Structures are given as C-alpha cells and as structure tokens.
Image (spheres, rainbow, N blue to C red):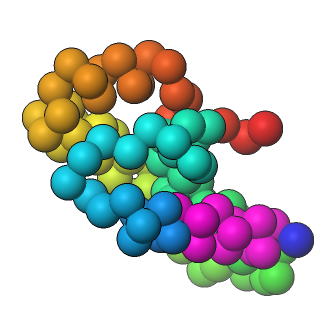
Amino acid sequence: MLLVSGLILVISSFSTLKRKGTLNLITDGIYAIIRHSMYLGGLIMFISHVFFSQHPQVIAGTIIAVLCCIQSMRSADQRNIQKFGEAYEKYMQQVPSMNMI
C-alpha cells in the first residue's frame, strides 16, 4: 500500500509538470497541497522497501535514500528561490514541503 501511495504521488507530480511545464511556478493541483510531492512519493516508496525486507543492507540503503531526498528538497528550494524569487518564498510559507495528510 505504501509503495502504491508513493507511486501515485510521483505520477501525479510528473503529470502536473508535463501539463504545466517547468518555466513557471506551479502552485495548483498536487503542488497546492505538497510543495515537494515527487520527493515525498519517492520517500514513501523508499520506506516501503523496509517492509519487503528487513535486511541490514535494505535498511541502510533506505536511510541513505531518505537523507538524499531531504537534501535534494532543500537544494530544490534554494534553486527555486533563485529562479522565482519572492513568489516562491511566499509559496513556501503557504504550502508545506511535505504534507502527510
């Protein structure tokens, strides 16, 4: 179930980006609820691997992947601030980076 939920978030994110493009700040659709929906979907999928196998390598790989996603989200915020300026900063205040609801 977690794997499918994460996949739905990733597909929804890609679909919105494909429809709207990446030249403008997208603040509707899934991006009106979750600022980094694609990263959240990836995180959920990575975490779901632990339920398939509790092998130490899987757990370690999951931890590394989660940390990389978190760092990538922070980097994406910085790039988007440079690209979109105050509009993105306002968007950051209105929409959470990851919304688990």
Image location (x, y in percent) of residue 3: 76, 74
Q: Nearer the viewer, residue 27 or 49?
A: 27
Q: Name the outermost residue toward the right.
A: 1
Does 84 sit above or below residue 72? Answer: above
Image location (x, y in percent) of residue 24: 25, 47
Lateral position of residue 47 relative to residue 69, left or right: right
Q: Quadrant of residue 18?
A: bottom left
Q: Would residue 59 be seen by someone viewing this image from the given angle?
A: no
Q: Name the outermost residue toward the front.
A: 19
Name the quarter where the C terminus is drawn.
top right
Q: Which residues are magenta?
A: 2-13
Main secondary structure along the magenta-highlighted residues: helix
Residue depicted at 44% across the width and 17% down the height: 93
Question: Any magenta on residue 4?
Answer: yes
Question: Any magenta on residue 18?
Answer: no
Does 73 sit above or below residue 58? Answer: above
Q: Name the outermost residue toward the left.
A: 82
Q: Would residue 23 be seen by someone viewing this image from the given angle?
A: yes
